[in-house]
Amino acid sequence: MKVMGVDFTSAPGHGKPIAVAAGQLVGGELRITSLRELTNFPAFDDELRSTGPWLAGMDFPFGLPARLLRALEWPTSWPVYVNKIWDMGKTAFESEIRRYRDNQPKGDKHHKRDTDRQAGGTSPMNVVNPPVGKMFFEGAYRILRSDASIVPCATNGGSRVILEVYPALVAKAFVGNKPYKEGKNEEDKQKRRQTRANIVSALSEEPFRQAYGCSVKLSEADKEQMIEDLSAALAFAARLSRVKGMQALAT
């Protein structure tokens, strides 16, 4: 079975591409075969249309909080509201989210799905720092129109299956709450690089196998690349946990 982990971004380019880790799950071993960077949405769309069978874990919110949908009197059917929001356009969508938030009391401006609360994730209503609302806008419509089987939003029994994942849960399982993304100064950068190295090392060790049911086979070159850009590798691993994938719809 081909398995992919996708580190998504709402504005792909050479500076911040969509990263894709792909591999084969053979018995109890997950063998990474490629680490690629997609610098534009057409390349991402082509990936979604690639021949199955495959299973992909993607790290952006597939849905919006049910409370928000009800308050705005938007449809609650996932395909229907995803199409509606795409037709609105990104600027109008962001404006509507901001307008709604501005009328909510302090401390209750960013509603969360149950899955966001369970995973400690950011609300899809957040459109800056991190802009997961923009990621929802750009990603949800693209996976919908791919005709893949999207669990649990729009399953169709097809051989191309997409799950929502939360890579930070994998990182926290092995390094706790230590920051692992790029730091602001050289000392921070070195510390965080070492933390990423520890995470990458953990992917091949026994505690990972016990947690996720398999081990990960990495070449030295793959390890080095993952230490430099870890997100796709974690999305790859997070797919195994299915922590968020089975609850992508808001409840």
Image (tube, grey):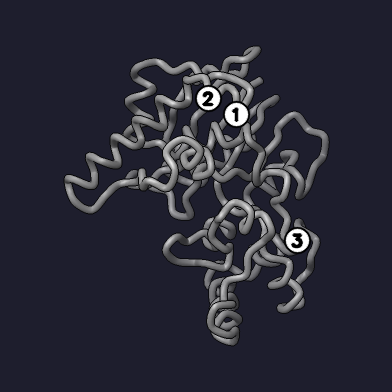
- Image-quadrant location for residue 77: bottom right
Q: Amino acid at mark 2?
A: Pro
Which residue is found at the position 32% from the left and 34% from the top?
228
Q: Amino acid at mark 1?
A: Ala
Within 10 angstroms of label 3, few (less than 14), some, or many (20 or more) residues?
A: few
User: How far separated are the C-alphas under marks 3 and 2?
Assistant: 32 Å
Q: Visible in this render: residue 248?
A: yes
Judging by the rendered image, the residue that carries numbered circle 3 is 251
Q: Which mark is residue 211?
A: 1
Judging by the rendered image, the residue that carries numbered circle 2 is 207
Relative vertical location of residue 14 with respect to residue 239 in this rendering, above or below: below
Q: Position of residue 70 (x, y in %)?
A: 76, 74
Within 10 angstroms of label 2, few (less than 14), some, or many (20 or more) residues?
A: some
Which residue is found at the position 73% from the left and 78% from the top?
71
Q: Could you tell me if the residues under marks 1 and 2 are in contact, i.e. CB atoms within 8 Å? A: yes
Label 3 secondary element: loop
* The C terminus lies in quadrant: bottom right
Label 2 secondary element: helix
Within 10 angstroms of label 1, few (less than 14), some, or many (20 or more) residues?
A: few
Q: Nearer the viewer, residue 215 or 175?
A: 175
* The N terminus lies in quadrant: top right
Relative vertical location of residue 82 with respect to residue 108 in this rendering, above or below: above
Which residue is found at the position 59% from the left and 87% from the top?
103
Q: Nearer the viewer, residue 172 or 227?
A: 172
Q: Amino acid at mark 3?
A: Thr
Name the residue furthest top.
27
User: How far separated are the C-alphas under marks 3 and 1?
Assistant: 27 Å
Q: Position of residue 128 (x, y in %)?
A: 44, 66
Which residue is found at the position 58% from the left and 75% from the top?
97
Q: Earlier in the sequence, mark 3 or mark 1?
A: 1
